[in-house]
Amino acid sequence: MLSRSTVVQSLRSIRDRFFDTRRQRNEQSDVQGTSNDVTGPSLDKLSVDMQFHIMTFLSPQDLCRLGGTSTYWRSMVRDPVLWKYFLFRDMPLWRSVDHLSLPQVKLTGSAVLDDSEMQFDYMAEYLRVCPACRNQWRHQPRAFESVTSFFQSFVPVSEPQFAMFGPGLEQLEISLMNTIMCSSHILPVAGLPQRQIDGIGSGISFKYKDQHRFNIATLYSTNRTERERARLEHISLRSKLFVYEEDTESIIPLSINPMFNQVCQAVNGFIFVANAETERGTDRGWEEESAQIRVMLDPAVGAVSRPILVLSCVSRETAERCRIPCVTIAHQLQLSLLPNPWMVQDTAAETLTGLLDGIDWLLRHSGVKI
């Protein structure tokens, strides 16, 4: 990550160039007998270290407003080194990221910017992906879309179904699904349908905002006894949801188990529960999970328009326990390579923080008008 001293050095060079240019203009004006001396505001006269310190407390919107106050501050605020510093400082703190807002940068920032990076607009990139900013760019429906939505409200919408899978369902100390089932104040259970999908249970229906019903079919990798043994012994098991290469110990799936084909064809989207605890497995585990997502979203099984919500899940959200940032989860799972809409949302199995934000996104991208 860029150090504060690197940013200050870059800002100082901008300041020096700016005031050198101003001084030359003033000297030229004196020769011509005119006065162009301008006394700047007190903020301009502070040291660069203090100016940078003040900027670190400003929101992106306030920084942009500061850049509009004068030519000097426009030069300072447009510094790519400054915005690269803010981007790498803030990315680990963001609670969600999606297919439209994944930063197009490497996760590791070098100490200096090379020529290609100096041409990259880090300011525009930050404003595009920052959660505090991107809500402002959310598409506003046009008049005809509002009329269409009004008429669509009279058309009965079938209950959307989602398939939930992933290691976070099984590896965490606290069961996410058990917490959801016992948290009627967050997601009330709307029913336990009796239908079956190719021998697989029909899942559980929930009610979002007391009006939108949706169904979650939970797909575990193995039976409960094997899952519990694997969690306690910290071992990896082949998921029975997938088919693997014969006569090998590979954990990289080739396709979906035919038993679950009908389930995957019937659902409107997917929920992948990732283990976001820092004590989790190795890069090999990320490779396996990325492959599982790609196989489940195979265009041969269903439309690429179906969304996938990735819940970046930990057992508990405490100050002492770190979590893997959602941006890192997105990169490790190679979600940017998917043609499907996707979102990574931080949540905790104990409190379900962030879950409703993820469900809201999933329903919207499944065609449900909220």
Image (spheres, helix red, strand yellow):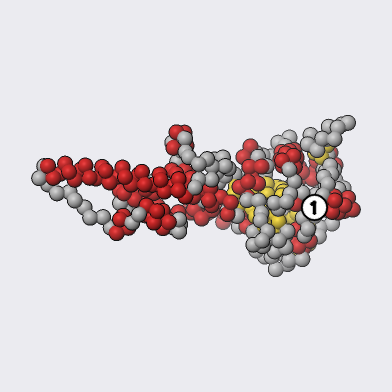
Q: Residue at x 19, y 51 (%)?
A: 37
Residue for point 74% across, 55% down: 215
Q: Quadrant of residue 315?
A: bottom right
Q: Quadrant of residue 290?
A: top right
User: Measuring 70% from the left and 36% from the top, which residue is drawn there?
Assistant: 299
Task: Give the total number of marks visible in the rendering.
Answer: 1
Q: Is residue 303 above or below residue 136?
A: above
Where in the figure is residue 352, as x and y percent of width and height?
Answer: 69, 61
Residue drawn at (47%, 38%), measured in percent from left and top? 113
Is 86 or 193 nearer to us in this picture? 86
* Percent x, y of residue 238: 84, 42
Point out residue 150 in the picture as x, y percentages from the top left corner. 56, 56
| Observer-nearest of 340 and 305 | 340
- The residue carrying mark 1 is 170
* Disc 1, SS: helix
Question: In the rendered view, would you say 187 is above or below 301?
Answer: below
Quadrant (top left/top right/bottom left/bottom right) for the C terminus: bottom right
Q: Residues within 10 Å of mark 1 (few under 14, many from 20)?
A: many
> Residue 243: in sight, yes or no?
yes
The picture quadrant where one finds residue 330 is top right
